[in-house]
Amino acid sequence: MADHNPLTAGPTPGPSPAAAPSPAAPGLLAARLTLRMEELHAAGLGRSAPLLDGLPASAAVPSGDIGNAPSPALVHMDGRPLLHFAGNDYLGLAADGAWRATVAACFARHAPSGTASRLAAGHTALAADAEAAWAEYFGYAECLFLPSGYQANLALLWGLLGHGDAVFLDRRVHASMAHALPPTGARLHTHRHADMDDLSRRLAAWRAAGNDGPPARGTGCAPQPVVLAESLYSMDGTLPDMARLGAVAREHGAFVIVDEAHAFGALGAGGRGRAHGVADAAVGTLGKALGLFGAFLLLPRGTRNALENLASPLIHSTALPEAHAACCLALLDLLPRLDDRRHHLAALGAALRAGLRAEGMPVREGAHVVCVDVGDEARCTRLAAKLRTPAGGGPGVLALAARHPTVGRGAAVLRLGLTALHRVDDVARCVDLLARAWKEEEERGAAPHHTTGESS
């Protein structure tokens, strides 16, 4: 008799599955969740993930005469064409046919799963080579790949910080940083958004209070403050003064961590971001400008092994697949050659801000993230909805109505994320539609107000 092959044989006869139990009557938990959702929607804070028919899939970034060809940044939602201004594919790599083919080839040649945690058996020589190459390219001693930017911030802060450490953070740092801090037991000191003078004053006050000694027990080292910042704040469009941050850190002997998730790839020489020479450690993601998935930490020497031993998000997670490391090595060959896209992206950002300001809208300074101050959450939601459903035909605009808790209460912003896939006429269309929607809101009798950009 032939051996039974479970891959080719039909299903093995067996007992029928038991009937599913009848659903229980809604209890207190379900009732509480329903009430919470009703409260969110009543306050204009309810959310639903937009369901797109697919993401852009263009072979090339716009150039030359485009004629009547549809925009490479076009998506569809419920059958409606929309210009995609709600994403973070800043260089258009996620839509690039050649890059997609490279990623496919890497996954065809290499294992698509890490199969185990990094420490158990999930780390390979190819991954080690890729991490070393990334550290060298970005100008750091060491690198670690992780599954997500959120996890990267958790791993870094949980592994680095301990009880009583002094942490100085911008009030607008990403939620992943803010959520990581309480379990560390660190003492938190916030400063005004992107205000380096305020940061310096708070560091000086901390020193003046006697926090520069004595050395921590068993270390022989005086306490060192830690500064958390971002190089581009994605819900504000703010570009903090990195040179000033570096000067303040040197003056006060601080260890600096900068989240460059929205800058790596798109800003700096060769896409190396804005904090090189300032940050002691940096956090980056591959799922934004870099057209892949996952995240990475750029670290000083000796930190990688410490995190392997101390950071639970790293210790207890399956390693990224070897195919991912192959993609990362291929990406480093591509990244220095994308200056044309970076220049195009910068020009689009300048054009969008100028166009919106010419229409009288309160637009913040920034780069490829353009934020329009709205204030009222319900009004911001209406503006985003009007952009999606324009009168008179033609494509609408998909934009993010950023509301609490993404931003402070009463400080809603309409966030427009640019990509190298956008064309100049896409930007003009966005300005035109938003200007019309803005005017309708003004005629409604409650004109959007200009906030200061500060959210406490």
Image: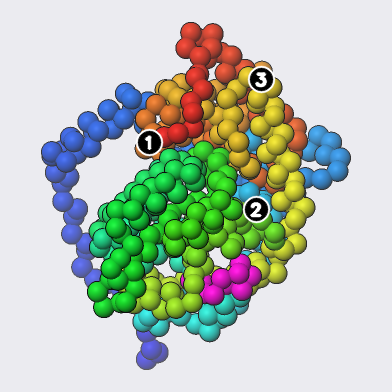
* Element carrying mark 3: loop
Q: Residue 395: give x, y in percent of width and height.
A: 66, 29
153, 129: nearer the viewer: 153
Picture layout, residue 335 above or below residue 393:
below
Q: Is residue 97 magenta?
A: no
Whether residue 130 is visible here, answered yes or no, is: no
CA neighbours of label 2 inside 10 A, class few (<14), some (14 to 19), many (20+): many
With 88 as the anchor, is 181 left or right in this view? left
Q: Type of residue at label 3? A: Glu
The dot on residue 456 is: 1
Q: Type of residue at label 2? A: Leu
Cα separation between marks 2 and 3 = 28 Å
Q: Type of residue at label 1? A: Ser
Residue occupying image coordinates x 50% and y 18%? 448
- Quarter holding the N terminus is bottom left
Please give the range of residues in magenta: 135-144
Quadrant of the image occupied by residue 329: bottom right
Q: Residue 167: give x, y in percent of width and height.
A: 35, 55
* Element carrying mark 2: loop
Q: Is residue 137 magenta?
A: yes
Whether residue 302 is visible here, answered yes or no, is: yes
Nearest to N terminus: mark 1 or mark 2: 2
Closest to the camera, between mark 3 and mark 1, is 1
Q: Which residue is mark 2?
A: 267
Residue occupying image coordinates x 65% and y 66%? 331
- Please report contact status of discs 1 and 2: CB closer than 8 Å, yes or no: no
Q: Which residue is mark 3?
A: 359
Cα separation between marks 1 and 2 = 27 Å
Q: Residue 45: give x, y in percent of width and height.
A: 37, 30
Nearest to N terminus: mark 2 or mark 3: 2
